[in-house]
Amino acid sequence: MVIHYNSSKQGAEDLISELASDFPEQKFITIQCNLANGYETEKLIPQVVSETGQFDLLVNNASVFKKSYLIETTVELMDEHIAVNLKAPFILMRDFANICKKGNIINLVDTRISSNKSNFAIYSLSKKALWDLTRMAALELAPDIRVNAIAPGITLPPEGENEKYLSNLAENIPMKRPGGLDPVLKSLDYIIENDYLTGQLIFADGGENLGFKV
């Protein structure tokens, strides 16, 4: 397994240590790449293959998540979100298809794609586009490559916020609690194990996509 990171080298190495302890029979490595840079991103899949050989699962979960309404969104903020949240997955999916040729692609979108709330405007738009890309790729790349998506909801706090922020948000969703990472991991397992599933979206969001309870 390859763990990608940009600037969080220590966090990636800590994760590798934890995984190696839990799964001593498997090999884990880290690879640094700035996904905001398209030229660096194009080198990532070939580098992974040169380090580990062919692989059969690509999970696109890197994301920029910054608050900004439409009327506040600068060109720089727009470019930052599109580069990481849409352009990088596009490049990685393309290269995975051309080099690895078979397997699974799973894209992490967001429950926000089901609404038109604009407080994270460009983030939401980039994730809506990633969902459309997921369906387009699922049609083109089948049957050798299955492409699906997961839409988490209240999972991790945005930059500058804490768990109390999540708990307050969760008061208005059907399940009334933050989900954490566990629903996402279980959804990953389900997609991988169901080999007839492609072009689908799992809302691992505690029902948030249904609307807020009042």
Image: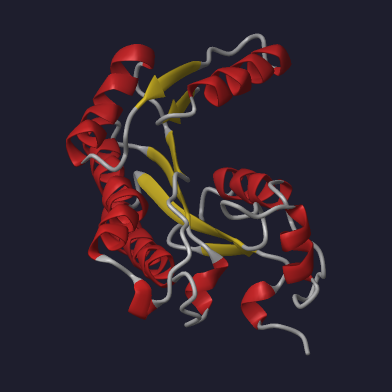
Of 113 and 68, nearer the camera is 68
Q: Specify whether 154 is left or right of 104.
A: right
Q: Report the front residue among 209 and 172.
A: 172
Question: Toward which corner of the image does residue 157 lie, by quadrant?
Answer: bottom right
Q: Residue 76 vs residue 175: left or right? A: left
Where does residue 62 sit, x and y in percent of width and height? Answer: 44, 44
In the rendered structure, the answer to whether residue 90 lies left or right of residue 60 reads left
Q: 159 above or below 211?
A: above
Taking depth in this image into account, of 180 and 103 the one nearest to the observer is 180
Q: Residue at x 76, y 85 (%)?
A: 213
Left or right of 158? Residue 40 is: left
Quadrant including the C terminus: bottom right
Q: Residue furthest top?
A: 25
- Residue 44 rendering spot, x and y as whole percentages: 29, 28
Q: Residue at x 51, y 80 (%)?
A: 115
Q: Is residue 178 above or below residue 191?
A: below
* Residue found at x 64% / y 14%: 17
For this orientation, the residue located farthest to the left is 39
Q: Position of residue 47 (x, y in %)?
A: 28, 20
Q: Quadrant of residue 53?
A: top left
Report the number of numbered marks. 0
Q: Residue at x 81, y 63 (%)?
A: 177
In depth, the one of 150 and 152 nearer the eye is: 152
Residue 75 x/y as whole percent: 23, 64
Above or below — where is 182 with respect to 10?
below
Q: Farthest residue toward the bottom? A: 214
